[in-house]
Amino acid sequence: MKVVTGIDQMQMVAEKARCAGKKIGFVPTMGYLHEGHLNLIRRARQLSQLVVVSIFVNPTQFGPQEDYQSYPGDLTRDTRLSQQAGCDILFVPSVEEMYPKGYCSYIEVKGLTQVLCGASRPGHFRGVATVVTMLFNIVKPHLAVFGQKDAQQAIVIRRMIRDLKQNLEIVVVPTVREHDGLAMSSRNEYLTPQERAEAPVLFRALEWAGSQISAGERSAKNLIQGMTRMIEAGERAEIDYISIVDAAQLRSLEQLDGDVLIALAVTFGRARLIDNLLIRV
C-alpha cells in the first residue's frame, strides 16, 4: 500500500490507473477507522482493481460548537487497518492543500439538506458535498462506497452526482453494528460506560418500529411516539430528531407508503449518534 499526501500526485496515480484500464474504487473517510469503514474498503476491493481510501477531517462540515478540534484520530493505526482491508492507495491530504488561502467555492444540494441532520447542523451538507466533489475530482473513481448509517449523506451525494453529471457509481453498504446493535461510529469513542450501556436503545427503537410496521402500523405519528417513549426511558439520551420520511425526497410522511426511511439522531453526553431503518411498505 502507498500513502499519498499531495493532490497532484494522487491525480497522477489516478490518471495512470485509468489509462491502464483499471477500475478505481474509492472510500472517503475522516479516519479513526472501525469495522464499518473496513467493510466499505473490502466491498470496494471486490468491485475494483485499484482501491483508494482517503482520510481527511473536513473542517467545512463542522459547526462552530462541534467536535472538529477533538475528532478522534490515529493515522498509524488507520494505515495498518486500511492495508489489511485491501487498500492500495491511502490519500491523506492536508487542510491547507484542500482549502488553500482564498478558497471560496462551495456546492449546495437544496431541499435534501434542509431536513433531518441538515436542520440541526446548518451548513453541514454544504461542506460534505463540497469536499466529496473535490475528492471525486482528485481520485477520479469509477465507484465510491458509502455506509447506510449515513443514509442522508448517501442520498444527497447520489442527487449531487446526478445533477452535476458526475460519471461514477455510488455503492451503499449496510450498517455494521456492535454485538448489541449499536451502529459502529468513530464518535462511539466519546461514550462513557453508562452512555454506552444505554445507546443500543436506538437500534431497539428502530427494530420495534419495524415490527410495528410488519404488524400493519402505518401512522408515522404513532411510530414516532412509541420510539420516543423507548429512548426517553433512559437517563442520558437527548433526542435531536426522530423522523419518518420518503426515502427519495426525504419528505415527512403522515402515513407510510412505498420506500420509507426512519431516521434519528440522539445525543449521549458528547456523542451525537445517528441511525436509521430503510423499509419498503
Image: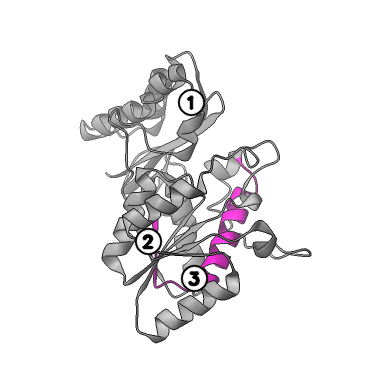
* Residue contact between numbered discs 3 and 1, judged by CB atoms under 8 Å: no
- Seen at 61% across and 42% down, the residue is 121
Q: Given this view, does label 2 or label 1 mark the residue nearer the observer?
A: 2
- Seen at 73% across and 64% down, the residue is 100
**Element carrying mark 1:** loop
Marks 2 and 1, the one that precedes in the sequence: 2
The dot on residue 191 is 1
Q: Is residue 274 visible?
A: yes
Above or below for 276 versus 112: above
Q: Position of residue 260 (x, y in %)?
A: 35, 45
Instruction: Decide if residue 208 is on the left or right side of residue 191.
Output: left
User: Amino acid type of disc 1?
Assistant: Leu
Marks 2 and 3, the one that precedes in the sequence: 2
Residue ranking furthest to the right: 102
State the separation of the CA atoms marked 2 and 1: 29 Å
User: Amino acid type of disc 2?
Assistant: Cys
Extent of the magenta region: 121-146
